[in-house]
């Protein structure tokens, strides 16, 4: 597809509609520059001329994302940003472990410390949302919550921009789309996530909707598909609603999934050798991350893995001793497994949460909500490993340098996938909205 470069620094854009009409941002700039003699006609002429010298779209560095989300608010001080020299009421009682790169992680991340050369840890992540729902919205969409617009999850944007491949859904939630911010926002519901509907760690695990009903044989299924095609043909001649488009897309993709043995096989976690399942851990997070690896290996572009229980207002030491070792085992196994299979270079792995926890332990030996600074870890997908990006201050209260926010996070993910974060989509009412607003790619990761 052709691209143009805005001579007024709007940037490269793939949308052919921009050749026909200026964007809202361009009109604002032209309005400003008209005072120095640049008319709209002259601007469009310059833009058209610049389009003739446009380069080819760069090859994306990643073709899949595994987004691990620890909802509830993981403590940064007890994981990726320990403060061993601080007072006990700040550093806590979990200790530290030295990583493969000579840094320190929290004492419960012993296995993750061994793959630290593959990780980039951001210790200066920050936003302003201290409520769970608003924090999740920020981290899953890249946007600050707004009463005026419902924003799509990053996985839904990827589904819209890149679409499915190999008869598999583009966007999958493991085990389910448990947050309201996994949805499609102002995009069509056709780009929503496929949910497993069951936990891969459960006995007798099966994925719902992966087989035809027992009473629907092939002839009957063919008649149903024929009827659906007739309905679609009728509505193609008229204006179709989002709901009809979404239903059409859903049925087409569902049939592709159900009718493809290879696609169905991607969800068969029982096909994994026992040794591999043991390496990840026979617990919730272990089997969820193993499922995520199977899905991206088969062709799914964006997998969101949810793991809850991180809201530790009381007794954080004991709670972390129960929750973190399985995550440590599974996360380190995922990184090592992807590397061994040659998948890590093209798979962007992100371990994140909605916010951090207060630097100082409260009277119940817990930590409360703290969005001012926290940590996330990223690996693969064209990012460099073995680095720490940004710092928090000595008490883990605020960024000491290089503050990074959700918009920067989203811009980086989209860019690594070959999606222009400055691209505009139309919300209902034909309102143009950028995929990312005021976000910058985190160059220190590249």
Image (cartoon, rainbow, N blue to C red):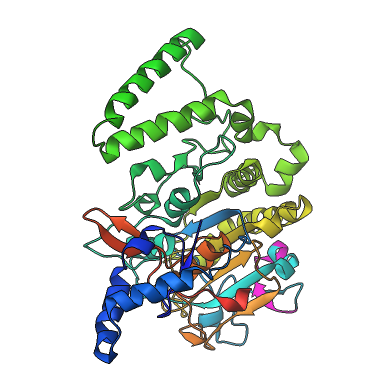
**Which residue lies most toward the bottom here?**
36
Q: Name the quarter where the C terminus is drawn.
A: bottom right
Q: Residue at x 40, y 35 (%)?
A: 249
Query: How many numbered tags mark residues here?
Result: 0
**Between 73 and 335, which is closer to the camera in this rendering?**
335
Above or below, comparing residue 173 to residue 355 in the picture:
above
**Quadrant assignment, res 354:** bottom left
* Residue depicted at x 28% and y 88%: 37
Q: Position of residue 434 (x, y in %)?
A: 36, 65
x and y, in percent, of residue 65 in the image:
57, 55
Left or right: 427, with 167 as reference point:
left
The segment highlighted magenta reads 102-111
Q: Is residue 67 magenta?
A: no
Image side of residue 48 versus residue 169, left or right: left
Q: Is residue 310 above or below residue 36?
A: above
Q: Nearer the viewer, residue 46 or 126?
A: 46
Can residue 93 be seen in this snapshot?
Answer: no
Q: Nearer the viewer, residue 27 or 219?
A: 27
Q: In this view of the protein, which residue sits in the foreground, 185 or 19? A: 19
Q: Is residue 286 above or below residue 368?
A: above
Q: From where the camera sits, is residue 173 visible?
A: yes
Q: Position of residue 342 (x, y in %)?
A: 76, 53
Percent from the top left, x then y, of residue 382? 66, 65
Residue drawn at point x = 43 percent, y = 64 percent: 139
Residue name at image x 75 percent, y 56 percent: 339
């Amino acid at each position: 597809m052709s691209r143009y470069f805005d001579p007024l620094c709007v940037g490269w854009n793939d949308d052919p509609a921009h050749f026909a009409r200026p964007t809202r941002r361009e009109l604002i700039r032209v309005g400003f520059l008209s005072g120095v003699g640049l008319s709209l006609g002259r601007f469009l002429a310059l833009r058209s001329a610049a389009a003739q010298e446009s380069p080819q779209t760069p090859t994306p560095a990643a073709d899949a994302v595994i987004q691990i989300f620890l909802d509830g608010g993981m403590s940064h001080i007890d994981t990726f940003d320990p403060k061993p020299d601080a007072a006990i009421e700040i550093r806590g009682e979990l200790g530290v472990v030295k990583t493969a790169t000579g840094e320190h992680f929290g004492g419960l991340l012993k296995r993750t410390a061994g793959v630290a050369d593959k990780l980039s840890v951001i210790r200066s992540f920050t936003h302003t949302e201290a409520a769970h729902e608003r924090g999740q919205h920020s981290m899953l969409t890249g946007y600050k919550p707004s009463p005026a617009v419902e924003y799509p999850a990053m996985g839904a944007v990827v589904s819209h921009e890149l679409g499915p491949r190999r008869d598999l859904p583009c966007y999958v939630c493991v085990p389910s789309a448990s947050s309201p911010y996994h949805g499609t926002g102002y995009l069509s519901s056709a780009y929503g996530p496929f949910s497993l509907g069951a936990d891969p760690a459960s006995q007798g695990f099966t994925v719902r909707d992966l087989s035809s009903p027992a009473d629907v044989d092939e002839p009957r299924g063919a008649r149903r598909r024929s009827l659906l095609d007739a309905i679609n043909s009728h509505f193609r001649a008229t204006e179709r609603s989002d709901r009809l488009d979404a239903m059409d897309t859903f049925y087409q993709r569902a049939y592709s999934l159900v009718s493809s043995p290879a696609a169905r096989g991607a969800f068969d976690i029982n096909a994994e050798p026992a040794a591999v399942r043991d390496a990840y851990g026979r617990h919730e997070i272990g089997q969820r991350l193993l499922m995520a690896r199977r899905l991206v290996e088969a062709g799914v572009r964006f997998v969101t893995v949810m793991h809850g229980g991180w809201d530790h207002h009381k007794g954080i030491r004991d709670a972390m001793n129960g929750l973190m070792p399985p995550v440590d085992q599974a996360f380190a196994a995922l990184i090592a497994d992807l590397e061994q299979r040659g998948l890590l270079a093209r798979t962007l792995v992100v371990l994140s949460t909605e916010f951090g926890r207060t630097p100082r332990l409260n009277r119940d030996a817990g930590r409360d909500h703290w969005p001012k600074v926290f940590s996330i870890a990223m690996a693969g997908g064209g990012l460099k490993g073995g680095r720490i990006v940004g710092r928090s201050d000595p008490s883990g209260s605020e960024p000491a340098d290089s503050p990074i926010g959700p918009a920067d996070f989203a811009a980086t993910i989209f860019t690594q996938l070959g999606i222009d974060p400055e691209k505009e989509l139309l919300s209902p009412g034909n309102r143009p909205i950028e995929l990312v607003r005021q976000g910058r790619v985190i160059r220190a990761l590249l």
